[in-house]
Image (cartoon, grey):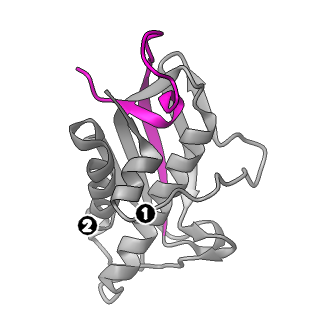
Amino acid sequence: MTIDIAGRLAQLGLTLPVAPSPRGLYVGAVIHNDIALISGQVSRVGDEIITGPVDRDTPPDVIRLAARTCVLRALSVLVATLPSTTAVDRVLFLRGFVHAAPGFVNHSQVMDEASTLLHDIFGESGRHARSALGVASLPGNGLLEIELTVALTPVPRDRPQEHAGRGIDTQQ
C-alpha cells in the first residue's frame, strides 16, 4: 500500500511548501540507486527564517516550528525529485545541525521534534538513525538545519501510479 505524503500531511493538518530552490552550486536532492539524499534544509518559511541560537529559554513552540519547517521543506524537495515509478521505502537517516548558544546541551531534544514528525507521517517506516550536532551558526542565522536520507523502492507496474512518486511503500 502506498501512502500519499501530501495526503498524510493533510490528515495531520499540515501542507507541503513549494520545494525550495538551491541557493548555491548544488542540487536539492540526489537519487543514486535506491537512496535519496536530501540537501540541508534550514528553518525557513518563505523569506523568513526561524532564527537561533537556541538556548534553555527558547520556547518549545519555536523549536517545534523550526523542526517541522525543516522536515516539510526536505519532504517537498523529495516529492519534487522522485520519479513517478518510485516510492519511499523508509527513512534511513536524519542529521540535524542545531544553532546553539554556548552551554546548550539539549540538541537531541530539538531533533526529537523532527523525528516525531517523520514517525507521525511514515509510521514505523519513519523510524531512523540520527545525529544531532550543536553548531555556532547556520545560514541566515537559522535555528536548525536538517539533512534527510531515504531508501526508495520501485512501484510495481500493476499498482496505480497516481501517487507513486509522492508516497511511501508500506508493504513489507
The three-letter code of the residue at mark 2 reads: Gln
Callout 2: helix, strand or loop?
helix
The three-letter code of the residue at mark 1 reads: Leu
Q: Residue furthest right?
A: 25
**Where is residue 81 drawn, in percent x and y?**
62, 35
Q: Out of 120 and 144, give the one closest to the viewer.
A: 120
Q: Out of 140 and 70, give the one closest to the viewer.
A: 70
Left or right of 119: which side holds 162?
A: right
Left or right of 84: which side holds 107?
A: left
**Counting residues from the N terminus, which is met first, the one under dot 1 or under dot 2?**
1
* Residues packed near mark 1 inside 10 Å, few (<14), some (14 to 19) or many (20 plus): few
From this view, report whether residue 132 is shown above or below residue 66: above
Left or right of 1: which side holds 49?
A: right
Q: Which residue position is annotated with label 2?
A: 109
Q: Which residues are magenta?
A: 144-172
Residue at image position (60%, 25%) is: 83
